[in-house]
Amino acid sequence: MAFCKVYIATSIDGYIATKDHGLGWLEQLDNPDGADFGFTDHMASIDALVMGRGTFDAVSDFRPWPYDVPVIVASTSLQSVPDDLEAGVQILSGSPAELVEQCELQGLNRLYIDGGRLVTAFLDAGLIDEMTISRIPVLLGGGIPLFGEMTDAVWWDHVATEAFAGGLVQSTYRPTPTSSG
Amino acid sequence: MAFCKVYIATSIDGYIATKDHGLGWLEQLDNPDGADFGFTDHMASIDALVMGRGTFDAVSDFRPWPYDVPVIVASTSLQSVPDDLEAGVQILSGSPAELVEQCELQGLNRLYIDGGRLVTAFLDAGLIDEMTISRIPVLLGGGIPLFGEMTDAVWWDHVATEAFAGGLVQSTYRPTPTSSG
């Protein structure tokens, strides 16, 4: 049974990137303690990173390639990835449930779900088991939103919040158990 | 010189009300300690509450009237308020700077700015001196957003964050001083 996690940074106003998919503002964060905000532990806890096409386009030029886990790009239109990424990146398509199933068939059970549209689709399908949201102390004023429209209101249990020097506030949530669930 | 504060609750996905301006979800928050989340202290710290038309429409039927401070409704279209509110509610119009000036002329210097569109307009005008955002642990999936589009990206200093039993996470920010400012 897969366990799907979100670990994502957003501006106070809820954007994960500028309108042109820019991530440079993340590097402007004051980080006096050199914290990694739990990223190393998070990456060690997952089997694969599943990202949407928009996120892949935003990071596909990063060299050295920042991920040492298998990367799944969820896309119905992407045909191929750069040659040097072929060993570590595969393209899959399908609904969130179908993506999870295809990962499980490969033995990839602990999945890091990344990117606004993909996260929203997984949330809407009730498939996110934990989300860690890091609020960067900036109002971007516009950009690519973390959360899109979803069908139902869903309550979450707050697990923990940590405020770091420099102003990043990181909160972790898990779905509130329901009597029907 | 006026001091303008935001003190507002939002869902994890950034909505301050459901699409029909509903606030009932706020009452579903688990609050085992009976916390008031600093609201009494906040209200004691302000001279007047300035709200947009949308917020006024959402609260104008509340009885007993919940505010014991002067309320300013920022609106160019609202003609009058219910008779029983006339003593405590006035209608003003103008830009954020003009609204602040009209308040100052009445000796109202510490202003609580409320409502998504008004907060966004004040932020865009650089007129917010402090904002306290309470994140309710729910994804509403849609609704009235807290933050609208703004012209410039603006960094803020994180002042404090407190996580309450029940999962509300409250963060306070103040504008980062700039060399030009």
Image (spheres, coloured by chain):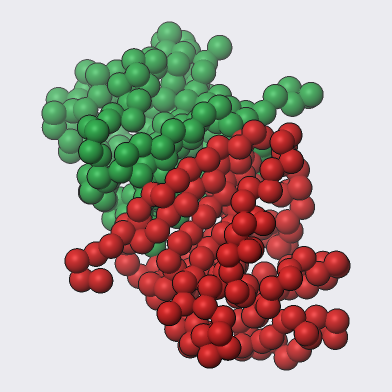
Chain colours: A red, B green
**Residue at 66% across, 38% down:** B154
| Image quadrant where one finds the N terminus of chain A | bottom left
Residue A45 visible in this rendered orientation of the protein: yes
Which quarter of the picture shows residue B114?
A: top left
Percent x, y of residue A80: 76, 89
Q: Quadrant of the C terminus of chain A?
A: bottom left
Q: Is residue B147 left or right of residue B137?
A: right
* Depth order, front residue of A111/B5: A111
Viewer-proximal residue among B164 and A25: B164
Residue A62: percent from left, percent from top? 82, 67
Locate residue B80 relative to residue B72 in the image: left or right.
left
Which quarter of the picture shows residue B51?
A: top left
Instruction: Count the numbered circles shown.
Output: 0
Please indicate whether residue A88 sits to the left or right of residue B79 in the image.
Answer: right
Q: Is residue B69 above or below residue B134?
A: above
- Does A105 sit above or below residue A56? below
Q: Residue at x 52, y 78 (%)?
A: A109
Residue B46, image x, y percentages: 39, 17
Residue at the image position 85 percent from the left and 67 percent from the top:
A64
Can residue B150 be seen in this snapshot?
Answer: no
Front in this rendered view, residue B15 or B137: B137
Q: Residue at x 60, y 74 (%)?
A: A47
Q: Which corner quadrant of the image does residue A83 belong to?
A: bottom right
